Image (cartoon, helix red, strand yellow):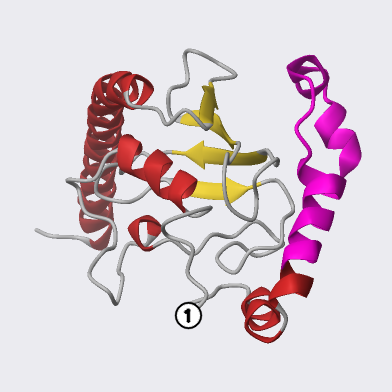
Amino acid sequence: MITLSKLKKEAEERKGKNSHNDSLISRRRASVRDRLLVKEIQEMELTLPATCRVNFENPNELHKFDLNVSPDEGYWQGGKFHFTIDIPEDYNMVPPIVKCLTRLWHPNINEGGEICLSLLRQNSIDGMGWAPTRTLKDVVWGLNSLFTDLLNFDDPLNNEAAEHYQTDKDGFKLKVKDYIQRYAKRINETCYSAGYLDSLY
């Protein structure tokens, strides 16, 4: 005879098995991510643009690292821009989470550090969004190119910066240089590692 307590007990047993299975799937997914990262990080480091430096604070956590971009041409030449890259467990089905920690005046990066770059979007109108075939190398090259080739005033995230450029190019250049002097000036690496940058914010 089926009783309410028996049905409840069976439901709890199924739930326990499901949570155990979910845990196994999560661990397996994480290990897939980690295996991918070992290969992708080696590739990324071999093809790193000359204007980029990667830093792993904890070498055992390949899913979290910092990227510094120091453009050698264009409006942002002379600046050093710090990005954090965090790779979620569902990688490579979802894109890395990237944030710019350096304040700058840029049409595709707002002052809060959010970034408008198609390949960082799960779904992109232009069809250039994230796909499992993309790699960390693509992310690094894309971020680097935001200061040159991929600079886009026609599809801005920071509308104010884009409008500033459209109406007053010289004023835009001066504001970019002012932000570099105040927030992104290249400094000695020992100052960076000693936490000097944190005191600037």
Over which residues does the magenta segment extend? 173-201
Assess disc 1: are there few (<14), some (14-19) or many (≥20) residues with their C-alpha within 10 Å of its C-alpha.
few
Kind of residue at badge 1: Asp
Residue 15 vertical placement versus 34 (above, below) = below
Residue 86 vertical placement versus 53 (above, below) = below
Q: Is residue 50 magenta?
A: no
- The x, y position of residue 81, in whole percent, is 65, 42
Quarter residue 137 falls in: top left
- The x, y position of residue 200, in whole percent, is 89, 40
- Residue lying farthest to the right in this orientation: 199
Give the labeled residue for mark 1.
154
Q: Is residue 185 magenta?
A: yes
At horizontal 83% and vertical 35% (from top left) the residue drawn is 198
Quarter residue 82 falls in: top right
Quadrant in which the N terminus is drawn = bottom left
At horizontal 48% and vertical 39% (from top left) the residue drawn is 86
At horizontal 64% and vertical 63% (from top left) the residue drawn is 106
Residue 159 shown left or right of residue 195 in the figure: left
Which residue is nearer to you in this view: 67 or 15?
67
- The x, y position of residue 132, in whole percent, is 19, 47
Quarter residue 130 falls in: bottom left
Residue 58 vertical placement versus 25 (above, below) = above
Residue 72 shown left or right of residue 185 in the figure: left
Which residue is nearer to you in this view: 158 or 169?
169
At horizontal 53% and vertical 26% (from top left) the residue drawn is 53
